Amino acid sequence: MSEEGEARQQRGIQSVEVGGQLLRALVHHGRPMALGDLARDADMAPAKAHPYMVSFGRLGLIEQDPISGQYLLGPLAMQLGLIGLQQNNPVQIATPLIDALALGIGQTVAIAVWGDRGATIVRIAESPAAVHVVMRHGTVFSLTSTASGRLFGAYMQAPVVKQLLEEERARRKQRDRVDPTPQPGMPVSAPMPTWREFELELEEVKRHGLSRSTGEIVPGINAMAAPVFDHKGAIVLSITAIGAAGVFDSHWDGELAKALKACARQISQRLGAPEP
């Protein structure tokens, strides 16, 4: 291809990118917008923005309200969005990101989904440290005494969580009847919380956007979990870090917490989650 041909091609690509700023503005605001407002957000004059909107309208990417004259996303944009959501697999998207997260924070990181028995590990990225906490695929986290369990509880419907709490209480009673003596080296199980007590714990999770556990299951082992949401705003994954208390930063605003939140937010954005 000649230099002149390459220049024409580059100008064409640039033109698409410039026009794409108008679509970005429309998506960012999430509501119908006037041409002047769209142009201002895209940093261009309305006279320059109008031809782009005409072309986008012909493609079905946008449409114009015949009464107000405002622009909104068109049928093709809707179809593209739906197909994209159908193709998104939360675990598949999250898996490569937790490898980098484990390396960055120096802790083992797991992806958990909500299964029939509770929050269940489906992917693990082991810590790069020579000595680290080992987790297993298929491990189910307690609703009330683990970071991942409480995280899901905080973002699920209250009636569902209340029922799950009572089911866990019944299982605990059955287990204690069968084997009332705790295993050597394991902590004595704390009493099951009442619904009101558990609600307060879940409110704390939502307040911080994180859940944490300090030595509740195994003495000296801490965990922290961040939520991943889908396009409907529903929790679909827990990104959970776990490690020895001596080298695990469990502060709500610590570097580990920030890294967990950033990773979970990145996955949520890929899934089309609404901005918080």
Image (spheres, helix red, strand yellow):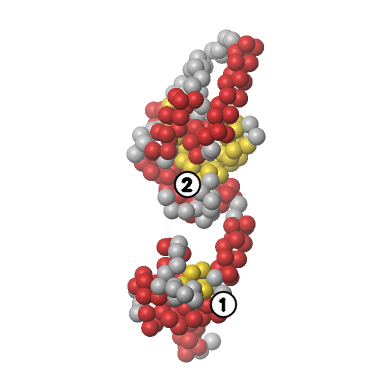
Tag 1: residue type? Leu
Residue 229 got which mark?
Answer: none
SS class, disc 1: helix
Tag 2: residue type? Ala
Estimate how packed mark 1 is, as few (under 14), some (14 to 19) or many (20 or more) residues with alpha carbons within 10 Å.
Answer: some
Q: Quick one: which residue is furthest to the top in this view?
A: 181
Q: Position of residue 184 (x, y in %)?
A: 54, 12
Q: Position of residue 157 (x, y in %)?
A: 54, 38
Q: In percent of the image, x 47 and y 90: which residue is there?
A: 4
| In-image side of 193 versus 36 (left or right) | right
Looking at marks 2 and 1 on the same chain, the residue that comes earlier in the sequence is marked by 1
Q: Which residue is mark 2?
A: 264
Residue 59 got which mark?
Answer: 1
Q: Quick one: which residue is furthest to the front in this view?
A: 67
Q: In percent of the image, x 45 and y 62: which residue is there?
A: 30
Residue 74 seen by the camera: yes
Q: In percent of the image, x 60 and y 66: which residue is there?
A: 79
Estimate how packed mark 2 is, as few (under 14), some (14 to 19) or many (20 or more) residues with alpha carbons within 10 Å.
Answer: many
Q: Position of residue 259 (x, y in %)?
A: 41, 44
Return the residue nearer the eye: 173 or 225. Answer: 173
In the displayed structure, 234 sits above or below 181; it is below
Q: Quadrant of the N terminus?
A: bottom right
SS class, disc 2: helix
Q: Position of residue 96 (x, y in %)?
A: 54, 50
Residue 243 seen by the camera: no
Return the residue nearer the eye: 124 or 19. Answer: 19
